[in-house]
Amino acid sequence: MTTGDRGADAALPPLVAAQHRAMPFTRLTDCGMDPADARRLLADTAAGLPWQDAAAILADTQLVRARAAEENGHSVTARQARRFASAALMFAQMALHTDTAEKRALYARHTSATAALAPEVERVRIPYRDGVLGGWLCRPAGPPRATVIVWGGLSGWGAAYLPVADAYTARGLACLLAEGPGQGESRLRHGLYVDEHVIDGFARFVDLVEADPRLGGATGIHGISFGGLFAAHLAAADPRVGAVVVNGAPATPTVPEFRTAREQMAAVVGTDDPGRVAEVMDSLRFDPDKHRIRCPLLLLHGGRDPLARYEDQEPFHRAADPDTATLRIWPDGEHTLYNHAAARDALTGDWFTDHLAGRHTPNR
């Protein structure tokens, strides 16, 4: 969610206005939608077409475009169209806050569109508990200098962050786009949810990086939105984490006031019991007096973020060593800095390069 044009919102039905606030043009393009598709999605839904239908239609059009390009030998165009389709399907499923059959089907279509990007995007599967954690590995052209694991929060995961992976691989870093417990196929297909031990699940992605001989160097983690809370906890608990970025996360998670946000959080925990949801959220509270981040930290904040105020994120900064903690604030920044995507990704890409593989890397 982010700020939007309140005057325009007032003319829309409440559900549509909420969708436009949660998925504005800046977020749609930040997560890889074709800008023309993003404008069309907002226009079509304002005109009354259900969000998930409008987004799926746009994805279908891009997939037709991809097949036509392939038939004519235009592989670059085909890959671009499949990426646009993957992003459109990611946003199609976001309209559904509970794990309905329709949401599962849309996410399965998103996964298929993303898998078609192989070999540039490699599907990852990690056995965990009674299910499988999923993700996508993107590698640079040469041997990676280090690896960054990226994950999202309550509604956007995995391949939603392919543009972030582009910024990292361009700098010689491998990037693992994770779908942890409560996220993506890990939840929708394999029934893995957020609980008091969710950090154990995210640590399995570090295990994978360490076990893959193609991924040398140090490991960083990058948590976006609610996922920044998981990243901070893992950085505090796991000495294998060489650097951490936290972007737009609450240090003290609570059950949201708004119905749609409550539904998203309940789906992440896998229960309709508000008491159980509150219990899990309380267990995830980040206390800087108990949880110390000993690796370098980059904390990102947007001054116009309605979901994570600076006060909500400040405990992460307080938990880190002042000599290795960096705070970057965009006064006009939306949630997770959708509206400063290029500058944000350049900053985090350079920062990880410096701290994992460059001039700030400690001697080992």
Image (cartoon, rainbow, N blue to C red):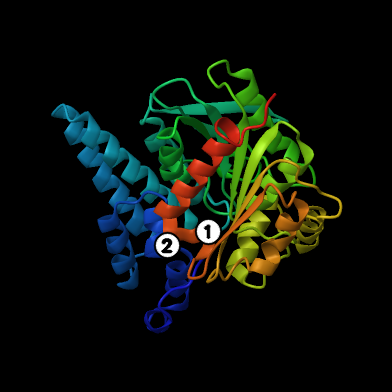
Q: Where residue 339 is drawn, which disc sits there?
A: 2
Residue 9's x, y, as percent? 41, 79
Characterize the local packing of mark 1: few (<14), some (14-19) or many (20 or more) Cα atoms within 10 angstroms.
many
Residue 291's x, y, as percent? 81, 49
Residue, x 75% and y 46% (percent of image)?
A: 293
Q: Where residue 34 is drawn, which disc sits there?
A: none
Q: CA distance from mark 1 to mark 2?
A: 9 Å
Near-viewer residue (221 or 356)? 356
Residue, x 61% and y 40% (percent of image)?
A: 221
Q: Where residue 336 is drawn, which disc sits there?
A: 1
Q: Quadrant of the C terminus?
A: top right
SS label for mark 1: helix
Residue 211's x, y, as percent? 64, 19
Left or right, residue 208 beside residue 197: left
Residue, x 76% and y 57% (percent of image)?
A: 318
Q: Amino acid at mark 2?
A: Asn
Residue 109's x, y, as percent? 41, 40
The answer to whether residue 92 is seen in the rendering is no
- Which quadrant of the figure has residue 204? top right
Q: Amino acid at mark 1?
A: Thr
SS label for mark 2: helix
Characterize the local packing of mark 2: few (<14), some (14-19) or many (20 or more) Cα atoms within 10 angstroms.
many
The answer to whether residue 305 is seen in the rendering is yes
The vertical placement of 105 against 309, above or below, is above
Residue, x 80% and y 62% (percent of image)?
A: 275
